[in-house]
Image: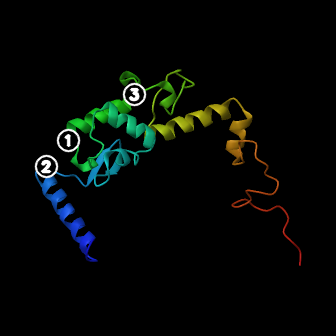
Amino acid sequence: GSFPGESLCHLSTQTAKMGSLVAGQEFQHILRLLNTNVDGRTKVMYALTAIRGIGRRFSNIVCKKAEVDMRKRAGECSAEELERMMTIVANPRNYKIPEWFLNRQKDHKTGRYSQLTSSQIDTALRDDLERLKKIRNHRGLRHYWGLRVRGQHTKTTGRAGKTVGVAKKK
């Protein structure tokens, strides 16, 4: 710009425009989706990532399948659009989202492919660990004992929070 404050000037007129644009509809600053508070001021795709079990890629594909304008803020979405997105998140297989995209593949009990969100993740994880403990699996026992599970060395590392065997004499 030609003078120092010009860029700021431009910014304020833009927000003023945005404000007037939104004033017609009811803009929600916080939305409640799947037991999670979602920030309405961020762009739709990134707002959805606040929900556990929905990352950027999954959020992107959901927005595309629901035909929601990605340039919109989450608070500007109509109830019907949000409903569409939540339906797609609930059963992504019906909307041609590939199996490899989902976060729960070939579930141990049901053999189904699904996308778990918010509280379902905790439940599934607890059930899995419970199953591993029940069958006295090595992995299950390591989880139970609070040790490293994936074959890391534990002789010298990861000692924080554990009690040390021998106290040093003076």
Report the front residue among 42 and 3.
Answer: 3
Q: Residue furthest right?
A: 169
Q: Residue 79 placed where, x, y %?
A: 21, 39
| SS for dot 1 | loop
Q: Residue 116 placed where, x, y %?
A: 45, 35
Q: Which amino acid does label 3 sit on?
A: Pro
| SS for dot 3 | helix
Q: Is any atom of residue 64 visible in this view?
A: yes
Q: Is residue 152 above or below residue 87?
A: below
> In whole angstroms, how far apart are the C-alphas of marks 3 and 1?
21 Å
* Residue tagged 2: 25
Sequence-first disc among 3 and 1: 1
Q: Residue 99 placed where, x, y %?
A: 49, 25
| SS for dot 2 | loop
Residue at the image position 50 percent from the left and 34 percent from the top: 103
Q: Which amino acid does label 2 sit on?
A: Gln
Report the front residue among 94 and 22.
Answer: 22
Mark 3 closeness class: few <14, some 14–19, many ≥20 residues within 10 Å: many
* Residue tagged 1: 78
Tag 3 and tag 1, C-beta contact below 8 Å: no
Tag 2 and tag 1, C-beta contact below 8 Å: yes
Report the front residue among 32 and 6.
Answer: 6
> In whole angstroms, how far apart are the C-alphas of marks 2 and 3?
29 Å
Residue at the image position 72 percent from the left and 32 percent from the top: 136
Mark 2 closeness class: few <14, some 14–19, many ≥20 residues within 10 Å: few
Sequence-first disc among 2 and 1: 2
Residue at the image position 50 percent from the left and 22 percent from the top: 112
Mark sitting on residue 92: 3
Q: What residue type is labelled 1?
A: Ser
Sequence-first disc among 2 and 3: 2
